[in-house]
Image (tube, rainbow, N blue to C red):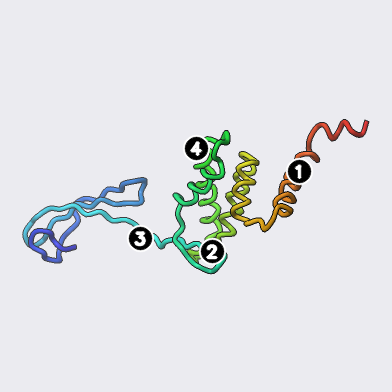
Amino acid sequence: MKCPRCHQASSKVIDSRPLVGGTEIRRRRECEHCGYRFTTFETIEATPLLVVKKNGDREEFSTDKLLRGIIRSCEKRPVSMAQMNEIVNQTKQNIENQDNGSHEVSSKVIGESVMNGLKDVDEIAYIRFASVYRQFKDMNEFYAKMQELMGNETTSSPESDHDDK
């Protein structure tokens, strides 16, 4: 490490302390040439995660962009910011668990994970997100998805048990 005062390349570490949950190290150094003491910080160099979009383009994964999409689908719905952040965190965790060393993830994996999270939290937000993500071609496709959701509810609803009597 070069000394900021005399620019010599030899310095020794006097003290090291982990910071920020162990992902960063603060080091106190002393120049072996002039005796000047200075501080350096070391962090892990993370390879960015790339999202492979439907058209083949690649862009860096952004939790902010993901959260904005979720917020948009949850507009005027009783979904808390904590719930939305949890969906983002769960999605990121799903991506990291599926990491095969390529540092790339399909937008399909991200979209499916978000839809699973939204489906458990608010079905209207789920439909909104799905309508943008799945790019329904017409009303029939959209209606079929709505019926699928409604079918899941009616098969498990207590009222369907009373129809047999």
- Structural distance between the alpha carbons of marks 2 and 4: 26 Å
Residue 103 vertical position relative to residue 30 in the rendered view, above or below: below
Residue 105 vertical position relative to residue 91 in the rendered view, above or below: below
Name the residue rendered at 61%, 54% in the picture: 112
Going from the N terminus, do you reach mark 2 or mark 4 first? 2
Residue 98 has which mark?
A: none
State yes or no: discs 2 and 4 in contact (Cβ < 8 Å): no
Secondary structure under tag 4 reads helix
Identified by mark 2, the residue type is: Lys
Report the residue marked by disc 2: 53
143 or 5, nearer to the observer: 143
State the residue lying farthest toward the left: 34
Report the residue marked by disc 3: 45
Observer-side mark, 1 or 3, equals: 1
Report the residue marked by disc 4: 81
Name the residue rendered at 39%, 60% in the picture: 46
Identified by mark 4, the residue type is: Met
Report the residue marked by disc 1: 152
